[in-house]
Image (cartoon, rainbow, N blue to C red):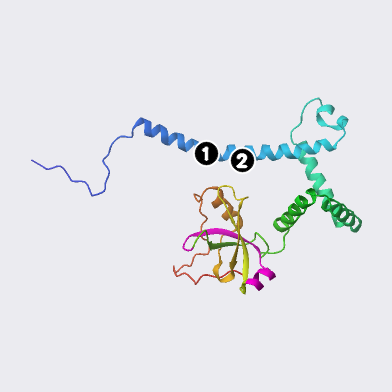
């Protein structure tokens, strides 16, 4: 009598897939396709709703629903882009720049409103201004946070911290460590430059990693071909 062939160790038994398990796998596969689409549509609709409020700048008789008798989606987006473009053109003009500066100075003197506006103005200038690769939020770094031996992704936001450097007697870098999956909140941590490691990943790649809870990990495009890692590069 011939003995039954023995299977290799670790080889699972060839059992048919359970219908409930197959249903669950197909359901998860469908969710992986539709969830990003639904989130994208929701964000686009949310932003479109905000931009459509620019129609309130038009007289009621000039608004699309009064001109054509129905709501026309997208008109507010076009109007918002036009307003932003014209504002930028005015800002490039010497007279326009002085006028905006005067209005800003007036707003900053208003209690509470001035503090909120000043903070928002500083933040927008820091994030949106294109001042080169080494400007704020242009460099992704690795820092030990929230304790030694545990690493987190961060972004360099400032380098020239004269008072902090003088009082700590160290060369300090300001790093923003975002939370996940909402990277708009986080912690502002001051690190000695030799404790900040520069990473090759881009800001977009780092944000994708944060938004997906680390599921989407960027490919290391500058990985050494010989597999030998260079010593960690300290922050600038």
Q: Residue furthest left?
A: 1
Location of the N terminus (image quadrant): top left
Instruction: Tell me the residue at 54%/36% (across/down).
Output: 34
Q: Tell me how far mark 1 sits from mark 2, CA to CA.
A: 12 Å
Quarter residue 63 falls in: top right
Circles 1, 2 touching at the beta carbon (< 8 Å): no
- Is-magenta flag for residue 162? yes
- Residue labelled with disc 1: 33
Rendered image: mark on residue 114: none
Q: Earlier in the sequence, mark 1 or mark 2?
A: 1
Quarter of the image containing the C terminus? Answer: bottom right
How many other residues sit within 10 Å of disc 2, few (<14), some (14-19) or many (≥20)?
few
Picture layout, residue 157 above or below residue 73: below
Residue 15, position in %: x, y? 28, 36
Relative to 21, does residue 115 appear above or below in the rendering?
below
Q: Is residue 46 left or right of residue 194?
A: right
Residue farthest right in this picture:
95
Q: Along the horizontal axis of the image, is 72 left or right of 226?
A: right
Q: Position of residue 41 (x, y in %)?
A: 63, 37
Instruction: Between residue 147 and residue 219, name the one nearer to us.
Output: 147
Query: Would you name the residue on which mark 2 appears?
Result: 40
Please tell me whether mark 2 sits on a helix, a strand or a loop.
Answer: helix
Q: Is residue 14 magenta?
A: no
* Relative vertical location of residue 125 with respect to residue 166 in this rendering, above or below: above
- The mark closer to the camera, 1 or 2, is 2
Residue drawn 55% across the image and 58% down it? 153
Per the rendered image, the range of residues in magenta is 148-167
Within-10-Å neighbours for mark 1: few <14, some 14–19, many 20+: few
Q: Residue furthest bottom?
A: 169
Image x and y of residue 211, in percent: 56, 48
Give x and y (percent) for residue 65. Answer: 81, 28
């Amino acid at each position: 009598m011939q003995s039954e062939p023995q299977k290799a160790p670790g080889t699972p038994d060839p059992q048919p897939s359970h219908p409930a398990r197959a249903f669950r796998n197909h359901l998860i596969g469908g969710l992986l396709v539709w969830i990003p689409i639904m989130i994208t549509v929701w964000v686009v609709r949310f932003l479109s709703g905000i931009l459509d409020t620019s129609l309130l700048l038009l007289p009621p008789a000039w608004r699309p629903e009064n001109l054509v008798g129905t709501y026309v989606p997208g008109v507010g987006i076009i109007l918002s882009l036009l307003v932003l473009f014209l504002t930028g053109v005015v800002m490039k003009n010497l007279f326009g720049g002085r006028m905006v500066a005067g209005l800003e100075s007036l707003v900053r003197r208003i209690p509470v409103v001035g503090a909120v506006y000043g903070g928002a103005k500083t933040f927008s200038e820091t994030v949106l201004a294109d001042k080169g690769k080494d400007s704020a939020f242009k460099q992704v770094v690795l820092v030990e946070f929230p304790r030694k031996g545990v690493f987190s992704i961060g972004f360099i936001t400032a380098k020239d911290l004269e008072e902090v450097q003088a009082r700590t007697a160290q060369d300090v870098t300001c790093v923003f460590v975002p939370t996940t999956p909402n990277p708009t909140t986080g912690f502002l941590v001051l690190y000695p430059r030799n404790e900040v490691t520069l990473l090759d990943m881009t800001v977009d790649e780092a944000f994708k990693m944060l938004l997906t809870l680390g599921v989407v990990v960027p490919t290391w495009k500058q990985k050494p071909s010989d597999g030998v890692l260079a010593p960690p590069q300290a922050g600038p």
